[in-house]
Image: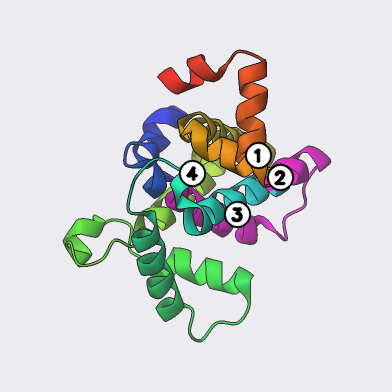
Amino acid sequence: MNCFSRLGWSTGGEFDQSILLWHLATDLCYYTDLNKESSPAENSNRKASKLLSDYMVYLLVKHPIMLPDGIGQIRFQDSCAEATEIFKCVKDRIQACKKLLLQVNTEIPQLEVKGDRSKSVLSEACRLAKSLQSLETEEEWNCEKKWEMMSHAWVEMLCYAACHCPRNHHAEKLRLGGELLTHVWLLMAHFGITEHVCQD
């Protein structure tokens, strides 16, 4: 089974949903892999993934106007509420992530569990995290390769967001000093790759 057939479902929905799914899955993988021995390249990709993940959620929550339309803030709030409920008794992040991966049933589709009343993506994020972790066991990837792929996924999401942000929002942010997203957009425009990414 190739990587896309295993993970492609995670990017098929709305963009804000993909950001949250990948953010939560990145956090789950980050904290469960934290105590593993790792190479400098793996550490670099793991840190880059975490930073880009945190930045994209920052945009989703604080500057949603810079991202394609969606219900990201509702999904974020519902996912936070669900995670808070699960993490009530756990203080350590590493243990909390391990508990979450064990506790959340990823076999039953979210819609069957919650119906339409919750927009939380926590269950799907656990499913994604488990799929990412299983790349090491079932696909015989090493941890470094997994984190390299994850960092590439985050760079793609950053580039997608940069070229789908309305230009007037980029201009407004430049006037105020600029967001990373705007600087990425400018670099992409400079190198002539905005059209290529925006068509995908």
Q: Residue at x 41, y 62 (%)?
A: 76
Q: Amino acid at mark 2?
A: Gly
Describe the element under mark 1 as helix, strand or loop: helix
Describe the element under mark 4 as helix, strand or loop: helix
Instruction: Compare residues 77 and 131 and report the one nearer the observer.
Output: 77
Earlier residue among tags 2 and 3: 3
Q: Rate crowding at label 1 as few (under 14), some (14 to 19) or many (20 or more) other CA atoms within 10 Å.
A: some
**Residue 9, quarter of picture:** top left
Q: Which residue is mark 3?
A: 54
Q: Rate crowding at label 2 as few (under 14), some (14 to 19) or many (20 or more) other CA atoms within 10 Å.
A: few
Labels 1, 3: front one: 1
Q: Residue furthest bottom?
A: 89
- Is residue 154 visible in the rendered structure shown here? no
Q: Magenta region: which residues?
A: 19-46
The numbered disc on residue 66 is 4
Q: Which residue is mark 1?
A: 174
Q: CA distance from mark 1 to mark 2?
A: 5 Å
Q: Rate crowding at label 4 as few (under 14), some (14 to 19) or many (20 or more) other CA atoms within 10 Å.
A: many
Q: Which residue is mark 2?
A: 177
Q: CA distance from mark 4 to mark 1?
A: 13 Å
Q: Is residue 107 above or below residue 183?
A: below
The numbered disc on residue 120 is none
In the image, 50: left or right of 112? right
Q: Quadrant of the N terminus?
A: top left
Q: Residue at x 60, y 34 (%)?
A: 155
Q: Amino acid at mark 3?
A: Asp
